[in-house]
């Protein structure tokens, strides 16, 4: 199926409306379209063509958005590169690209007219995204125009898409959660507000002064904003929070501050969101990660993987947001994540099968133990891993970052865990870290970097 090009449609409908606001400048849809058309001409002159890969190694901002939409107009595959990744990783991501964009593209049209696509083929590949790689090397995921469009539809059904929407992202545009905001905004002809990196004070000021209606966060950035004094602003209708588990303690803090949090679960292979708490249910304290998006199906496979929690199993996903190469032969995307579904179809994510600790024959979800530890008032963050043990096979080990001026010790934390968890889930080893735990730019724990600590 072929549809009208999103940016061209937005410029025709709302040419003077703000497409992109950044700390360094803003563009209307008419201005963004003109810049993208000029950029498409430059990419073509440099050897890019429909179907070829174009690596975008630019910080989040106007120039990145120009290059992204230039690729879409040309029909080239956009490959975002994390500019803060090590040089070797950046080179690997860009290795198969026909063109690498490391400087802003020209905004001046070329003298020779350059045709650009007025349509998008929904079956064609639009993006090549690299996964976060929390437990192994990042993987390539090809997402089609259809995946992106259905994801935008599903998000809009869950959260709404009013014409005055101003969606703030301080997330990396090299990952699906960040770049999706630029694309959803173009599809809906609304405004994306983009920061190059997360800075709690800057985000807090923006939320208070710039009529932000939606903001995308992860647990760590939500906590930093609450620490900085975040309270409900008159315009904010949703703080979409995902990228990993969100502790119950943190959700309670957000409710006390009147911050409307919608929990979401997603992954790159499903073009970001899979389940999202819909706008009307945000105030419901029972809502964990919401029902599936419109036209997305989720089921729990208890035979493939599971933990000791009743009803838990591997989360399987099916629908038009799933990357074409991602499903297994049975037609389902096997996420490797563990979860449960309640009677209303609300998902609760309880861990990842590859991270499950098997101690004395019992399965332990690190996420469950981390949530208990992080509920302690003296604990800022925690990571739970399996450590080789001659008696138990694996012993539950915790790495803990204390809050400032806290002196809680291993004995106190063991007693805290024992009040909530079965004995085999209580960590047998504790290590205290003086600094923040390593995370991806999207907020996920980098467990592979914690193994040697």
Image: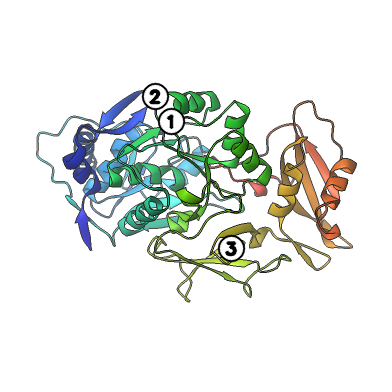
**First in sequence: mark 3 vs mark 1:** 1
In the displayed orientation, state which residue is furthest to the left.
112
Residue 153 appears in the picture as rendered: yes
Q: Which residue is drawn at 46% across and 58% down?
A: 269
Q: Name the residue under label 3.
A: 336
In the figure, is residue 316 to the left or right of 253?
left
In the figure, is residue 431 to the left or right of 317?
right
Q: Which quadrant, please, contains the C terminus?
A: top right
Q: How crowded is mark 2: few (under 14 residues within 10 Å), some or many (20 or more)?
A: few
Q: Position of residue 38 (x, y in %)?
A: 19, 36
Nearer to me, 394 or 97? 394
In the figure, is residue 371 to the left or right of 40?
right
Q: How far apart are marks 1 and 2 (CA)?
A: 7 Å
Determine which of the numbered discs, if any, sits on residue 195 in the image: 1
**First in sequence: mark 1 vs mark 2:** 2
Q: Mark 2 points at which residue?
A: 23
């Amino acid at each position: 199926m072929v549809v009208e090009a999103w940016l061209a449609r937005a410029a025709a409908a709302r040419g003077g409306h703000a497409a992109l606001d950044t700390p360094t400048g803003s563009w209307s849809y008419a201005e963004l379209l003109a810049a993208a058309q000029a950029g498409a001409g430059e990419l073509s002159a440099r050897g890019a063509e429909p179907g070829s890969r174009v690596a975008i190694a630019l910080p989040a901002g106007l120039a990145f958005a120009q290059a992204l939409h230039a690729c879409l107009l040309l029909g080239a595959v956009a490959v975002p590169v994390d500019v803060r990744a090590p040089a070797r990783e950046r080179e690997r991501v860009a290795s198969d690209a026909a063109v690498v964009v490391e400087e802003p593209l020209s905004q001046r049209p070329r003298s020779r007219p350059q045709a650009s696509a007025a349509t998008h083929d929904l079956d064609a590949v639009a993006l090549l995204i690299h996964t976060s790689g929390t437990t192994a090397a990042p993987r390539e995921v090809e997402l089609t125009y259809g995946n992106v469009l259905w994801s935008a539809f599903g998000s809009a059904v869950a959260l709404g898409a009013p014409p005055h929407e101003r969606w703030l992202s301080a997330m990396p545009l090299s990952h699906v959660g960040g770049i999706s905001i630029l694309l959803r905004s173009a599809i809906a002809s609304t405004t994306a507000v983009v920061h190059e990196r997360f800075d709690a004070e800057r985000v807090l000021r923006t939320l208070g002064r710039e009529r932000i209606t939606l903001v995308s966060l992860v647990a760590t950035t939500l906590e930093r904003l609450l620490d900085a004094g975040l309270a409900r602003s008159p315009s904010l209708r949703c703080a979409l929070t995902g990228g990993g588990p969100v502790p119950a303690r943190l959700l309670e803090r957000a409710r006390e501050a009147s911050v409307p949090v919608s929990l979401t679960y997603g992954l790159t292979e499903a073009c970001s969101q899979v389940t999202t708490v819909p706008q009307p249910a945000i105030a419901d304290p029972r809502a964990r990660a919401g029902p599936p998006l419109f036209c997305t199906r989720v089921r729990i496979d208890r035979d493939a993987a599971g933990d000791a929690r009743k009803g838990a199993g591997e989360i399987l996903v099916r629908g038009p947001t799933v990357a074409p190469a991602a499903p297994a032969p049975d037609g389902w995307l096997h996420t490797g994540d563990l979860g449960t579904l309640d009677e209303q179809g609300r998902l609760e994510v309880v861990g990842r099968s590859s991270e499950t600790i098997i101690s004395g024959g019992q399965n332990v979800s690190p996420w469950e133990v981390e949530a208990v530890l992080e509920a302690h008032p003296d604990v800022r963050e925690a990571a739970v891993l399996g450590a080789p043990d001659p008696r138990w096979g694996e012993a539950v080990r915790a790495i803990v970052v204390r809050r400032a001026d806290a002196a809680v010790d291993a004995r106190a934390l063991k007693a805290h865990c024992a009040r909530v968890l079965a004995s085999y889930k209580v960590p047998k080893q504790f290590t205290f870290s003086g600094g923040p735990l390593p995370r991806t730019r999207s907020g996920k724990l980098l467990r592979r970097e914690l193994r040697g600590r």
